[in-house]
Image: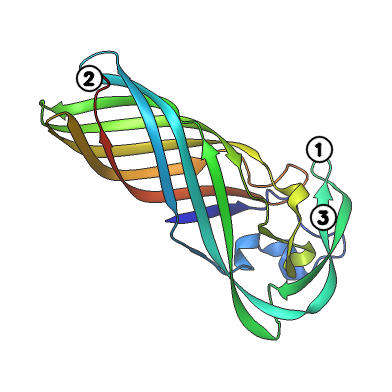
Amino acid sequence: IGYRKLFDGNRKLSLPGSSPVMDEKLDVKAFVDHKPSIGFELGGHLKYDLSRSLTLRGGLQLNLTRYSIQAFAHAPEKASVPINNAWGYQSDSVVVYSNIRNIAGNRPVALKNQYLQISMPIGAELKLFGYSKFQVSLAGTLQPSYLLNADQYLLTRNFTNYAKEPSLIRRWNVATGLEAFFSYQRGDVRWQIGPQFRYNLLSTYQSQYPLRENLMEYGLKIGISRPLH
């Protein structure tokens, strides 16, 4: 299940003096209708046992993280996406055309923001207890990641429209993963199953865009492993 944390970081989407009263008093989460959505993770690792309890691992994986957006269709109209300078003050904007409104359009539409990332997780597993066949373990990884698509919707000034502006989407990110799992060995094959949590440490957007969005995933991970002979 994918979702996001959304922050405005005290940097508004409006020019000083031009924002509505409610825009100045409420944060961005009060203006959007977002819901979690189902994604997937697929990957493989190589493992190296440092001891009977500690194992290093590294590999490659593919993650599709997404969430749904409830919005409104509207006739195409000009909108502007704000850009902040390095100190967080309004300095410029990008003009776009949008046929999607966040509030007060012609009819409801359902959108999805989808993020397809390829990652290189590096981390370790710690066996908590168990014996040769049954084990319970914890694992953690750092995951340098690259975003393969850049067609997500972002909010325009005053939270009025949704538009696409690929130049403001961050391609490189770093995620962290934490999981706990139960494993069972039969012959040379070890099966494992357990919950995991994954969180992108950097914002989806470039630093010039006033909002910050950090992706996160809650999931059930199923895997198999076997020794290399």
Quadrant occupied by the N terminus: bottom left
Residue at image mark 2: 53
Please tell me how crowded label 1 is: few (under 14), some (14-19), or many (20+) other residues with Cα within 10 Å. few
Label 3 crowding class (10 Å Cα cut-off): few <14, some 14-19, many 20+?
Answer: many
The picture places residue 127, in percent across and down from the top left corner, at 22, 26
Under circle 3, the secondary element is strand
Quadrant in the rendering for residue 45: top left
Amino acid of disc 3: Pro
Residue located 42% across and 46% down the image: 41
On the image, numbered disc 1 is attached to which residue? 86
User: Residue tagged by mark 3?
Assistant: 82
Q: Secondary structure at mark 1?
A: loop
Residue 183 point in image, percent of width and height: 19, 36
Identify the image quadrant of the C terminus. Answer: top left
Name the amino acid type tagged 1.
Ala
Q: Alpha-carbon distance for marks 3 and 1?
A: 13 Å
Determine the residue positioned at 56% across, 38% down.
201
Residue 63 in the image: x percent, y percent? 48, 46
Mark 2: secondary structure:
loop
Residue 211 placed where, x, y %? 69, 52
